[in-house]
Image (spheres, rainbow, N blue to C red):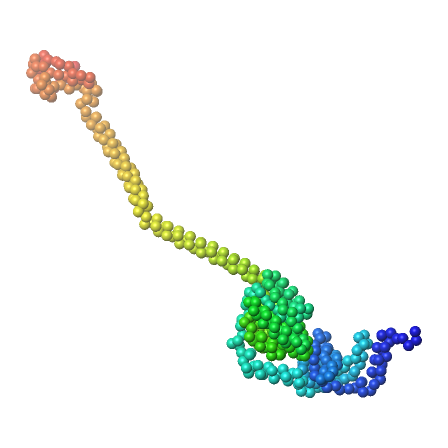
């Protein structure tokens, strides 16, 4: 069909028209910065806006490295460059070569005025800040029901502690009714006796986040009995809610990490405490056993029964020593007696009689020692080893004895 073109052909045609326009190839545009994002490659993506319109813009890394200040949302700037078409998406944008600061935008000035006002009223004072519980079990969330923020909070919360209960109030976080919706969510969850509230949303321009700078939200956060964590936008985004809340988190994900304790770390800490307690208990028991053993030994030393038994044993040993000594004495005396008996036996009349000698006495028992003791015809007794013989002296001869 004649006159029908593809999308690519149209985009290419329009791109050529833009490039042939001398004004668009070298132009400066004044506006307020919004949706500013620094890419890891070094490129800067942002939008320029005024009261009636918005224009997309990009500054490539080669030009961005020469920028003398950091581009922030709300800045009023003059951007010099060219306007061209991005063929793939079929949209035009401003390709910036240089950016000059042109004061602060009206929205940024309004933000600074609100911040100063609430600060002077004491809304940011440290004495109003409440500590965030270390072991929250019931957490309220005021944010959009379908945004990335609530999913990030849910995922991180479940990963850190699956036993925590989450209560979501699906609020509007952008637009004319957003401030009242967020404030109502804070008041509703504040009445449920929760441990902590997370109030926030994902990133966006200053206009997108403006609901968190409005009075209904500020008053609801300040009046809440439950500790509030503000988690609005990205790390570089700030709202009045961040300063009024009890704690600011750079992102919703960070808010979940601050509100939900890591159950694995707690379990590890409990295990360490159990081990330390067991070690201390074993040491204490061992020390007590040693003390008791010392007391037992001391008691054994002073125990009357033990002392009596020791005395009894000493007496038995003394008795044994005495018996041994007596036995030795008796043995010595017996030996001495045997020696004396042997000597006595050597001079014993009976022993002499046994050797063939005789003992002669008068009839009245008087020993006859000499012939002078014997009268003729007198009676006498002659004792031999096995008895005696009664005899009469027939003849008495005086003088030395002679052999028979």
Q: Position of residue 180 (x, y in %)?
A: 63, 75
Q: Quadrant of residue 291?
A: bottom left
Q: How many marks?
A: 0
Q: In the image, is residue 404 above or below residue 71?
A: above
Left or right? Give the position of 21 relative to 219: right
Residue drawn at (54%, 60%), measured in percent from left and top? 270
Image quadrant holding the N terminus, namely bottom right
Q: Does the image show residue 359? A: yes
Q: In the image, is residue 228 above or below residue 263?
A: below
Q: Position of residue 225 (x, y in %)?
A: 54, 71
Residue drawn at (59%, 81%), measured in percent from left and top? 115
Residue drawn at (59%, 70%), measured in percent from left and top? 188
343 or 233: nearer the viewer:
233
Q: In the image, is residue 251 above or below residue 112?
A: above
Q: In the image, is residue 308 above or below residue 35?
A: above
Q: Quadrant of residue 156?
A: bottom right
Q: Does the image show residue 195? A: no
Left or right? Give the position of 98 relative to 385: right
Image quadrant holding the C terminus, namely top left
Q: Position of residue 250 (x, y in %)?
A: 62, 73
Left or right? Give the position of 332 relative to 396: right
Q: Position of residue 62 (x, y in %)?
A: 74, 80
217 or 46: nearer the viewer:
217
Q: Quadrant of residue 244?
A: bottom right
Residue drawn at (89%, 75%), measured in percent from left and top? 4
């Amino acid at each position: 069909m004649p006159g029908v073109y593809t999308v690519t052909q149209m985009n290419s045609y329009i791109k050529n028209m833009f490039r042939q326009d001398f004004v668009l190839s070298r132009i400066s545009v004044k506006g307020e910065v919004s949706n500013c994002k620094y890419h890891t490659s070094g490129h800067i993506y942002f939008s320029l806006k005024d009261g009636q319109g918005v224009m997309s813009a990009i500054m490539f890394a080669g030009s961005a490295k020469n920028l003398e200040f950091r581009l922030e949302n709300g800045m009023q700037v003059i951007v010099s460059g060219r306007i061209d078409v991005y063929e793939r998406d079929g949209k035009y944008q401003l390709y910036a070569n240089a950016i000059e600061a042109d004061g602060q935008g009206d929205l940024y000035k309004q933000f600074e005025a609100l911040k100063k006002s609430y600060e002077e009223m004491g809304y940011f004072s440290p004495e109003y800040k409440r500590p965030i519980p270390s072991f929250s079990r019931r957490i309220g969330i005021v944010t959009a029901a379908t945004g990335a923020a609530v999913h990030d909070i849910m995922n991180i919360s479940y990963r850190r502690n699956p036993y925590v209960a989450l209560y979501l109030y699906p609020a509007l976080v952008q637009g004319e009714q957003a401030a009242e919706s967020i404030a109502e969510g804070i008041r509703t969850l504040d009445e449920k006796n929760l441990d902590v509230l997370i109030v926030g949303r994902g990133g966006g321009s200053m206009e997108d986040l403006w609901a968190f700078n409005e009075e209904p939200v500020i008053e609801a956060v300040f009046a809440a009995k439950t500790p509030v964590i503000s988690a609005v936008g990205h790390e570089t985004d700030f709202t009045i809610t961040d300063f009024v809340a009890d704690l600011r988190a750079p992102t919703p994900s960070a808010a979940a990490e601050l509100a939900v304790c890591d159950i694995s770390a707690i379990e590890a800490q409990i295990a360490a405490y159990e081990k330390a307690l067991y070690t201390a208990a074993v040491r204490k028991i061992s020390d007590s056993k040693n003390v008791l053993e010392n007391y037992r030994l001391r008691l054994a030393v002073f125990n009357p029964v033990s002392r009596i038994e020791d005395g009894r044993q000493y007496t038995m040993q003394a008795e044994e020593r005495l018996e041994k000594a007596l036995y030795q004495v008796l043995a010595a005396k017996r030996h001495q007696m045997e020696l004396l008996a042997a000597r006595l036996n050597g001079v014993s009349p009976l022993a002499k009689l046994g050797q063939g000698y005789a003992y002669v006495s008068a009839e009245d028992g008087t020993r006859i020692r000499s012939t002078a003791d014997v009268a003729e015809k007198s009676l006498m007794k002659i004792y031999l080893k096995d008895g005696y013989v009664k005899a009469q002296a027939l003849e008495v001869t005086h003088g030395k004895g002679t052999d028979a």
